Amino acid sequence: MGVERALFVTNMYPSQARPAYGIFVQRIAHAMEARGVEVRVEQIHGDSNRGDYYFARSRVAEACNTFRPNVVHVHFGWSFLAAATRAPRVVSFYGDDLNGIVRAPGRFSALGHVGIGISQLAAVRCERSVAVSEALRKRIWSSRARRNCTVVRDAVDQQLFTPGDRTTARRRLGITDDRLRVLFPHSLAQATKRLDLAVAAIAALVEGGTDAELWIVNAALPGEMPEYYRAADALIVTSETEGGPSCVKEAMACGLPVVSVPVGDVATIAEAPGRAFIAARDPRALANAIEAAIDVGKKDRSAYLPEYLTLGSASRRLLRVYDEAIAARLTASRQR
């Protein structure tokens, strides 16, 4: 069928002030452009002004009139409110849109419930949808909408995220000691990332005789992150909820062993037995897994990312989803 132009409607996209915000949307846009698809981005400033999800409708309509996209790709469920267009639509779900916004473990905000409702509507009204994990796809209420949803996990740029020498990476980052470091590259502003559990796991690790520290990194520029993965000894994920944590895939591409609680799509790491570990939400269980991961990392720091988690694979799958959305819109038009 062939897609020449795609309009991205997104509430998250990198800026000078927030260079890592929505970096995965930018990377997939570049991957689509590498496949010959012209991509235009219409950004919604919903993070600072919820009303822009509605008021952006005029900007999106104007973009559709002038750019004439073959498909409109909506990123994050809330963004669907801005995509009032006759063009075929694809919506990508990333986590908080279908899971809800959690203020603290077990406590959903009222706004989170509104977002879930908007996302469920988007899943039904858009021709096709994409979820970053199978667990997230299963959150869609409508059985028909679930069937029209394809799992395309957040992908990794293999040109940027590559293995490297641990000592060299530490020197570049100005680290002079050789202490074991367990990387925690998550936002401290989100209680659901469960910093408390990660801290408890490291405490249990130290109590067991391993001299290690929790290395909190959440302000590095996107292009700097590969060095942190190379310099660390293991990655830990303790989140209460996730869609598909990018840090897990990036760590795999850089050869860093991963330890995670069962959340989101981290079951992916089961494809790398002995290189990555899933542990119960218990400090001692996590500590044991970290210890095993560190031992493995001392012997093998080669990349172990599955091919289907690369940007090239993700962009191919998205093109198929775009074609399906266009075909579905044509079929619906003929039936009217």
Image: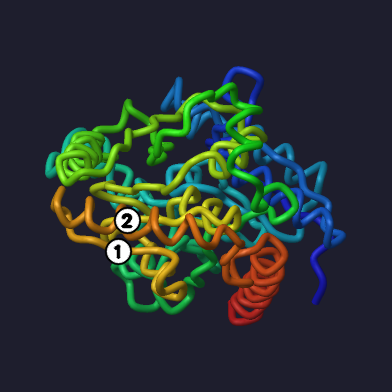
What quarter of the picture does the C terminus occupy? bottom right
What residue appears at the point 70 percent right and 56 percent down from the top-left corner? 158
What percent of the width, then of the height, locates residue 228?
55, 37
Where does residue 30 sit, x and y in percent of width and height?
A: 76, 49
The residue tagged 2 is: 260
Q: How many marks?
A: 2
Amino acid at circle 2: Ser
Residue tagged by mark 1? Answer: 278
Viewer-closest of 167 and 64: 167
Q: Does 229 sit above or below residue 126?
A: above
- Residue 40 shown left or right of residue 198 in the figure: right
Pick the front one: 291 or 201: 291
In three-dimensional space, the C-alpha distance between marks 2 and 1, rounded to whole angstroms, equals 5 Å
Residue 205 figure quarter: top left
Location of residue 192 (image quadrant)? top left
* Mark with earlier residue (2, 1): 2
Of all residues shown, which one is farthest toward the top? 17
> CB under 8 Å between callouts 2 and 1?
yes
Identify the residue at image location x=32%, y=56%: 260
Q: Which quarter of the figure has residue 70?
A: bottom right
Q: Residue at x 60, y 38 (%)?
A: 167
From this viewpoint, is residue 108 visible?
no
> The disc labelled 1 sits on which kind of residue?
Ile
Using a 10 Å C-alpha cutoff, classify the residue at mark 2 as few (fewer than 14 neighbours), some (14 to 19) or many (20 or more). Answer: many
Residue 136 visible, this angle: yes
Identify which residue is drawn at 32% across, 37% down: 212
